[in-house]
Image: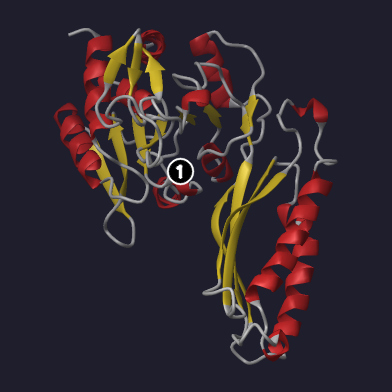
């Protein structure tokens, strides 16, 4: 079987696992473990606190520093409400394209990495290849942290981390970070005929969301237009608003979520200072309505940006491997920033276009997988030298 055919078969299996972030990824992790075990892989499963999801850190080769990490997330976004033409969890070929949820983002890269596991094992490597397969990347890169911590603790530091997000095999040296805030406001219920007798959580939420919106508008003046990012400034968006029980009841509860996406040169805490000041004023106001009233803020996700590295090992290696020398940055968040924050040189490069990610009828072109086979074959040849 050719490497491309093997990659397609593996991708079909991976797509067949519904690993939507709200659900378990354990069946996929168990399959990968069984797939890698015959190649002598050292397997470390790192479950989440609920035991329903897990990261998998697998090593082929000796337990020594200087290896390469192949990083990919196993979870996918929901298909709910999307007009799919095919079964999203059955890999389907049409016109040179392989359709299926996660085919592009990012099971295509994982399939390529797994398809070459046997070749890695046969190469008698002097430095290891690590597989770092994570969960919950699609919900704020929330799952990978324990696996990164384990890599740091064990001390066999890899040479660099290769994150295989879809880039059409272009090398990406920077991405924005994301911080996701949940704001919960508790007021006091009363009849809407006399709102003075209560404190509307919804009204307070409107005021706070107004502050968030003003910061977002002002943030458009920040950032460097020459940075390559599009948009080049921090973006702040409110994505969820929930609250109230009836139109004639002053709302006791309201919650909203907003996210901030910014580059490594922006201090998010400083950017949001007017919002946090407004929250304190709201708390003081609500305290007069009763001891149970107030505002609570939780950070649901905090994935740092990936910053450009001066003469970075990961970027240099991947440019040499792919022949790509263009400068690229991306506005989306990924796990690369978390690896970099832990001290690992990190860059992004993988098959498919990010334009396909999260879309109905998501696909990866067969030509992208073929190019990936050629890149991985070059990787193996260089690891032997």
In front of the other: 213 or 322: 213
Tell me if 182 is positioned left or right of 19 in this view: right
Q: Is residue 304 left or right of residue 129?
A: right
SS of the residue under disc 1:
helix
Count of labels in the image = 1
**Picture quarter containing residue 173?**
top right
| Quarter of the picture holding the N terminus | top left
The answer to whether 364 is drawn above or below residue 80 in the figure is above
Q: Position of residue 94 (x, y in %)?
A: 32, 12
Image quadrant occupied by the C terminus:
top left
The answer to whether residue 40 shows anywhere in this view is: no
Q: How crowded is the residue under tag 1: few (<14 C-alpha within 10 Å), some, or many (20+)? A: many
Say left or right for 1 vs 362: left
Query: Residue 304: x percent and y percent?
Result: 60, 46
**Against 50, is 226 above or below?**
above
Residue at 70% across / 41% down in the picture?
Answer: 264
Observer-nearest of 115 and 67: 115
- Where on the picture, by quarter, is residue 61? top left
Picture colour scheme: secondary structure
Residue at (27, 19) in percent of width and height: 92
Q: Residue at label 1? A: 138
Q: Who's the residue at 36% across and 8% down the image?
A: 370
The x, y position of residue 299, in whole percent, is: 57, 61
- Confirm whether residue 132 shows in the render: yes
**Relative to 76, residue 368 above or below:** above
**Which is more toward the observer, 126 or 269?**
269
From the top left corner, tell me how far across and down residue 271 is, in percent: 78, 54
């Amino acid at each position: 079987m050719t490497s491309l055919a093997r990659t397609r078969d593996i991708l079909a299996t991976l797509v067949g696992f519904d690993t939507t972030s709200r659900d378990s990824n354990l069946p996929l992790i168990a399959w990968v473990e069984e797939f890698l075990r015959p190649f002598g892989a050292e397997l470390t499963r790192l479950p989440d606190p609920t035991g329903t999801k897990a990261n998998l850190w697998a090593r082929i080769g000796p337990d020594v520093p200087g290896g390469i990490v192949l990083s990919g997330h196993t979870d996918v976004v929901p298909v709910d409400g999307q007009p799919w033409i095919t079964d999203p969890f059955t890999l389907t070929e049409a016109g040179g394209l392989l359709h299926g949820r996660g085919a592009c983002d990012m099971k295509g890269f994982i399939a390529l990495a797994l398809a070459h596991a046997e070749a890695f094992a046969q190469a008698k490597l002097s430095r290891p290849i690590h597989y770092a397969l994570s969960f919950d990347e699609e919900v704020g890169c929330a799952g990978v942290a324990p696996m990164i911590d384990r890599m740091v603790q064990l001390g066999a530091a890899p040479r660099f981390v290769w994150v295989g997000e879809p880039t059409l095999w272009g090398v990406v040296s920077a991405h924005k970070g994301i911080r996701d805030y949940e704001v919960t406001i508790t007021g006091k219920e009363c009849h809407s005929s006399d709102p003075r007798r209560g404190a509307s959580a919804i009204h307070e939420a409107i005021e706070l969301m107004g502050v968030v919106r003003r910061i977002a508008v002002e943030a458009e003046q920040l950032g460097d237009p020459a940075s390559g990012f599009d948009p080049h400034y921090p973006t702040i968006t409110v994505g969820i608003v929930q609250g109230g029980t009836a139109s004639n009841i002053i709302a006791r509860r309201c919650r909203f979520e907003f996210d901030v996406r910014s580059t490594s040169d922006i201090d998010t805490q400083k950017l949001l200072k007017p919002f946090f000041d407004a929250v304190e004023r709201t708390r003081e106001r609500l305290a007069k309505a009763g001891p149970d009233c107030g505002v609570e803020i939780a950070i649901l996700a905090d994935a740092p940006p990936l910053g450009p590295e001066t003469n970075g090992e990961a970027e240099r290696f991947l440019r040499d491997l792919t022949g790509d020398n263009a400068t690229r940055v991306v506005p989306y968040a990924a796990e690369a920033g978390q690896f970099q924050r832990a001290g690992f040189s990190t860059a992004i490069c993988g098959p498919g276009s990010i334009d396909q990610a999260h879309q109905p009828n998501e696909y990866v072109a067969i030509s992208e997988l073929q190019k990936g086979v050629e890149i991985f074959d070059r990787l193996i040849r260089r690891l032997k030298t």
